[in-house]
Amino acid sequence: MDTLSYKTVSANSATVQKDWIVVDANGEILGRLASQIAKILRGKHKPYFTPHVDCGDNVIVINADKVRLTGKKMTDKEYVRHTGHPGGQRFATPREIMEKHPHRVVEMAVKGMLPKNRLGRRIFTNLYVYAGGEHPHSAQQPKEITF
């Protein structure tokens, strides 16, 4: 006896509606901002969220160079990477990274909050981070949101 009045909807790439969203990072705290961006990129804010499908929106982050870190994280936090050669472990603080590439701190924070698989790498391509207040995606008519 089938008495359910509803069916579970499973989204796929043909049924997903992807929007464009602008986020202003001016004065925002890095981790709190990154977790909200990751949620939007993943699509968890939508009623038809499906874990194995890229159903999130495209996110444009502006003013990434004006993001804040609390406490002494700007100088004490360390990002570790490896060149692939023996003895190739390299360390950098957020201040050093922001001097050369201001957008990378936001990108690394969001990337760390996405799944570590093919889907996570695919979702990460929907993120566009810019250091200044301008972006070249005005043709997509993005909606601006604040957290």
Image (cartoon, rainbow, N blue to C red):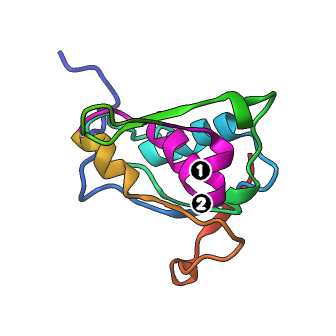
Residue 147 badge: none
Q: Tags 1 and 2 in contact by the CB under 8 Å rule?
A: yes
Please name the residue shown 54% across and 39% down the image: 109
Say whether residue 22 is left or right of residue 128. right
Residue nearer the viewer, 99 or 58: 99
Give coordinates of residue 117: x percent, y percent. 25, 35
Helix, strand or loop under label 2: helix
Give coordinates of residue 105: x percent, y percent. 58, 47
Against 61, residue 120 (above or below) is: above
Mark 1: which amino acid? Ile
Q: Is the residue marked by circle 1 packed among few (<14), some (14-19), or many (20+) residues within 10 Å?
A: some
* Quarter the N terminus occupies: top left
Give the spatial CA distance, label 1 vs label 2: 5 Å
The answer to whether residue 46 shows anywhere in this view is: no
Against 13, residue 85 (above or below) is: above
Give coordinates of residue 52: x percent, y percent. 26, 37
Q: Is the residue marked by circle 2 packed among few (<14), some (14-19), or many (20+) residues within 10 Å?
A: few
Give coordinates of residue 10: x percent, y percent. 27, 39
Please name the residue shown 39% across and 38% down the image: 49
Residue nearer the viewer, 102 or 95: 95
Quarter residue 94 falls in: top right
The answer to whether residue 16 shows anywhere in this view is: yes
Residue 100 badge: 2
Mark 2: which amino acid? Lys
Please name the residue shown 59% across and 60% down the image: 100
Q: Which residue is mark 1?
A: 97
Write down the region rendered in magenta: 91-117
Residue reaching furthest to the left: 1
Against 70, residue 58 (above or below) is: below
